[in-house]
Amino acid sequence: MSHAITAMILPGTVDAGAADRWDLAPVPMRCDLTLFHVTHYYTAYWQAQLGISSYFELPSEAPGLFPREGVMMTIATELATRPDPTFAVVLTDYFGGAGDQWAVVSVDGGPMQSVNTINKALRALGISAVAGSDEFDTVGLAAHRSTPDYLDQYVDLCDKLGV
């Protein structure tokens, strides 16, 4: 069984209107978190549309399709309804138990920091694992196994923009 997602995760209340404006579907999770599926193509499209030129610095071992576009901070700020959002961006790519994961986190609007594992990112969001589980299972992330099809349109949109 596979688990392959890329997502932004925010703690606390999120602005549903902002989610609509950004073409994102909020997915409530345990521990007062909300997940928003994104892809590299999604962030590349919005980065180009808005003319944002900033990118997050990530270590060379970060996956090539990991979203590094600076527009993520703009999106998180609007979703969180505060100028200094705390959020994580996570990626999983597992099949049959083998694979990779990656995560970055911004705390209180600070620079994106590579934390490599999703559990470390969730701890930075204030999550503590319950007995017998890790943070990944505590928040119910295992239930979200694939990226929704509606994000596929961003591949074509990027092609049309030449991005």
Image (cartoon, grey):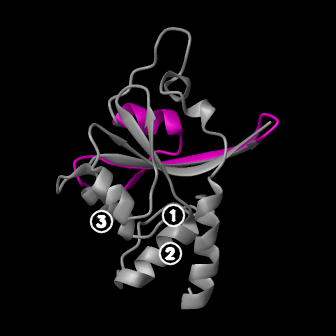
Q: Quadrant of residue 127?
A: top left
Q: Secondary structure at mark 3?
A: helix
**Residue matched to label 3:** 74
Q: Is residue 28 left or right of residue 84?
A: right
- Asked whether residue 18 appears in the rendered view, the answer is yes
| Label 1 with label 2: CB-CB less than 8 Å | yes
Q: Amino acid at mark 3?
A: Thr
Classify 123 as above or below 69: above
Residue type at numbered disc 1: Pro
Q: Label 1: which residue?
A: 67
Can you say which quadrant of the picture contains the N terminus?
top right
Q: Is residue 65 visible?
A: no
Image quarter for residue 61?
Answer: bottom right
Which stretch did the figure color magenta?
95-124
> In this picture, is 158 found above or below 25?
below
Q: Residue at x 26, y 40 (%)?
A: 13
